[in-house]
Amino acid sequence: MAEIDCPFQVIWADRYTGNVGIGTTSPAAKLDINGTVAVNGNKTIMWQDFATPLTVEFSFSNSTPQNVALTGVPANARYILANVFLTTNISDHFNMLLGRSVTSTTSWVGTRGARPSTSFNDNQAQHKVLLTYFGETDNFSSYFGTWYSSQIIPINANSTLDAASAGNSNSSGWVYMVIRAYSY
């Protein structure tokens, strides 16, 4: 290891691996930065992987919004990267809305073929993820549930996630999440 003197931060370079570290004395990658990165003064989104992914499981019932605690996610995190599994008690489709400030499942476009921009607003589009489960009567999904891989989900400032569902009939079921990383 060789230390490079810099007026603001110590930079480490490993001559054997070629890895360079800023804010870390043992860089594990070609460029390993410990801290927040800014490009032209603007913070960039940085992801922090969990050494062991977190799991969260919660039940839901039709049209009952809820706030779900994300134990292990830092309070100042703003996004999570998760795989989500949905299963339900009905054989028909339903929608699950996950994100920040979810108060209900929203029918964003009231008419088939309607122009989306006339119905969307920034809060709906920016802070939520809509997952649609097509039940086996729709001939699209398995009877047992569906995986949605690598979903980037906005979360509340207090390490919680809002969720609401709406389905055909009285849907209820379970959400199982494997949280792989978070971002500020």
Image (cartoon, rainbow, N blue to C red):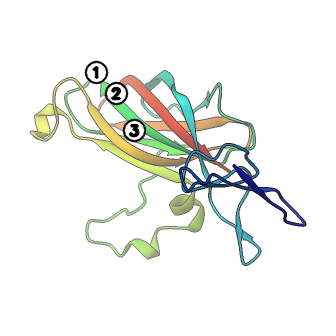
Write the residue at 37% across / 23% down: 172
Task: Label 3, secondary structure: give it.
Answer: strand
Within 10 Å of disc 2 (Cα), the crowding (few <14, some 14-19, many 20+) is many
Q: How far apart are labels 2 and 1 at the CA level? A: 6 Å
Q: Nearer the viewer, residue 157 or 72?
A: 72
Q: Residue furthest right?
A: 7
Residue 1 position (above or below residue 90): below
Between residues 14 and 31, which one lies in front from this camera angle? 14
Dots 2, 1 in contact, CB < 8 A: yes
Upstream in sequence: badge 2 or badge 1: 1
Question: Secondary structure under badge 2?
Answer: loop
Residue 168 drawn at (x, y percent): 28, 36
Residue nearest the viewer, comparing 158 with 88: 158
Instruction: Give the percent coordinates (x, y) of residue 114.
Output: 32, 72
For label 3, the residue is 166
| Mark 1, residue position | 89
Location of residue 84 (image quadrant): top left
Q: Secondary structure at mark 1?
A: loop
Which residue is found at the position 26% from the left and 71% from the top? 113
Instruction: Name the residue carrying label 2.
Output: 171
Horizontal side of residue 17 vs 167, given as left or right: right
| Residue 58 visible in image | yes
* x, y percent for residue 96: 41, 40
Kind of residue sitting beneath label 2: Ser
- Separation of disc 2 and disc 3 at Cα? 7 Å
